[in-house]
């Protein structure tokens, strides 16, 4: 195929899209202002679940396609960072979810001893994002792609260097496109030593600004969280951190005494609907927009990457 493509952005959306294109034979370069380990994706929890993403009728199929890929990757957890982990989603009933939920193997109503408040039980992919981002970067290199540290101030810079550009800039699309409908939803996390917890727990209460969840990873327990709309600060707030620990400790009291390892803040790139759209520019170049995944970038990454790559392929 030998067409050159520049993918702008090195979060999970950018890297997964770049890898998908490279595996189709495109010559792919990723341009990124910061390395993958410093992106919002690196901060993610990251449990597979269609959270804060629209439109639901498209997010469901994207999520299921990604689920199938993560199940395969979970066979090599040390390499890929993906493990299948059981847990409960408190307060959610099976009938309240979209059609996608009927395709999730093993998803069922939680038993009383599993979740006294009622909810769902499922065994889902839980992704150690620093490991997974390294895996994506390594697979991209194996497929012939490269990652370049470069701050992009205008998408025209990329179009001047390649006939195809894929805009995976997340919140950066707000100024680069520009698209003011992309808004931050601030998420704060607390990392603690794991006191022996091996299941995940989520209680989001819809789009509450103060959800409670914890995710067990090999070297830490990730506690969350927040969902503060239009909040731009990336500095951890000590009062919020303390409240996160208290909320999680109400579910598992042993969390209260766990040693704190660190704090993380990420800004989810929310939009009324994900934008995956091709635009033929005046100079003949192709620009594919691929952003606005909110809190579900990991969940839909592979399905959305295929759709974005299809737009490149179909444009010839």
Image (cartoon, grey):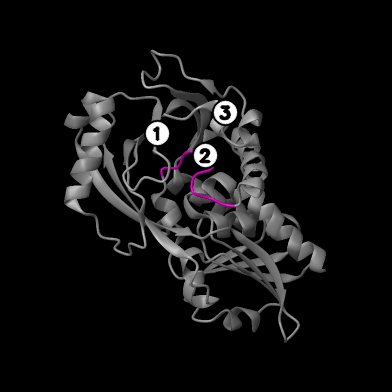
Left-right relation of 237 to 269 = left
**Crowdedness near tag 3: few (<14), some (14–19) or many (≥20) residues, C-alpha within 10 Å:** few
Q: Quadrant of residue 313?
A: bottom right
Q: Residue at x 64, y 29 (%)?
A: 102
Location of residue 25 with respect to 72 vertically, above or below = below
Pointer 2 local density, CA inside 10 Å: few below 14, some 14–19, many at least 20: many
Which residues lie in the magenta part? Answer: 45-54
Q: Residue at x 71, y 59 (%)?
A: 309
Residue at image mark 1: 202
Percent x, y of residue 167: 59, 68
Task: Please state if 315 lies on the left or on the right of 67 as rendered.
Answer: right
Which image quadrant is residue 311 in? bottom right
- Mark 2 or 3, nearer chain start: 2
Q: In terms of secondary structure, where does tag 3 sit?
A: helix
Residues at marks 1 and 2 touching, judged by CB atoms closer than 8 Å: yes
Name the foreground residue: 307 vs 178.
Answer: 178
Residue under pointer 2? 49
**227 relative to 66, above or below:** below
The residue depicted at 48 percent of the width and 72 percent of the height is 180
> Is residue 208 visible to us here?
yes
Q: Earlier in the sequence, mark 1 or mark 2?
A: 2
Estimate the spatial distance between the alpha carbons at disc 3 and disc 1, rounded to whole Å: 18 Å
Q: Nearer the viewer, residue 16 or 146?
A: 16
Q: Quadrant of the N terminus?
A: bottom right
Residue 218 placed where, x, y %?
38, 33
Query: Which of pointers 2 and 3 indicates the residue nearer the eye?
Result: 3
Is 286 drawn above or below residue 100 in the view shown?
A: below
Residue corresponding to mark 3: 95
């Amino acid at each position: 195929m030998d067409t050159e493509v520049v993918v702008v952005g090195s979060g999970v959306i950018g890297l997964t899209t770049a890898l998908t294109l490279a595996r189709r034979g495109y010559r792919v370069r990723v341009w990124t202002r910061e390395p993958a380990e410093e992106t919002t994706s690196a901060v993610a929890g990251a449990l597979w679940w269609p959270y804060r993403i629209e439109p639901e009728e498209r997010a469901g199929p994207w999520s299921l396609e990604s689920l199938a890929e993560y199940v395969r990757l979970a066979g090599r957890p040390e390499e890929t960072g993906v493990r299948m982990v059981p847990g409960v989603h408190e307060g959610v009933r099976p009938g309240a979810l979209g059609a996608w939920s009927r395709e999730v193997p093993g998803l069922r109503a939680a038993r009383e001893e599993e979740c006294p408040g009622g909810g769902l039980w499922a065994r889902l992919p839980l992704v150690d994002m620093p490991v997974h981002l390294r895996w994506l970067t390594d697979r991209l290199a194996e497929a012939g792609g490269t990652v370049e540290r470069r701050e992009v101030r205008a998408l025209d810079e990329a179009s001047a260097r390649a006939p195809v550009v894929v805009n995976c800039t997340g919140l950066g699309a707000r100024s680069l496109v520009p698209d003011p409908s992309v808004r931050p939803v601030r998420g704060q996390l607390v990392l603690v030593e794991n006191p022996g917890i091996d299941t995940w727990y989520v209680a989001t209460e819809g789009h509450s600004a103060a959800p409670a969840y914890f995710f067990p990873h090999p070297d830490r327990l990730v506690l969350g969280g927040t969902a503060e709309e239009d909040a731009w600060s990336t500095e951890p707030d000590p009062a919020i951190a303390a409240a996160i620990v208290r909320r999680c400790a109400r579910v598992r009291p042993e969390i209260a005494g766990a040693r704190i390892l660190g704090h993380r803040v990420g800004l989810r790139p929310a939009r009324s609907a994900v934008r995956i759209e091709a635009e033929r520019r005046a100079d003949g170049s192709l620009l594919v927009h691929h952003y606005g995944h909110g809190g579900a970038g990991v969940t839909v990454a592979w399905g959305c990457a295929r759709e974005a790559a299809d737009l490149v392929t179909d444009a010839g």
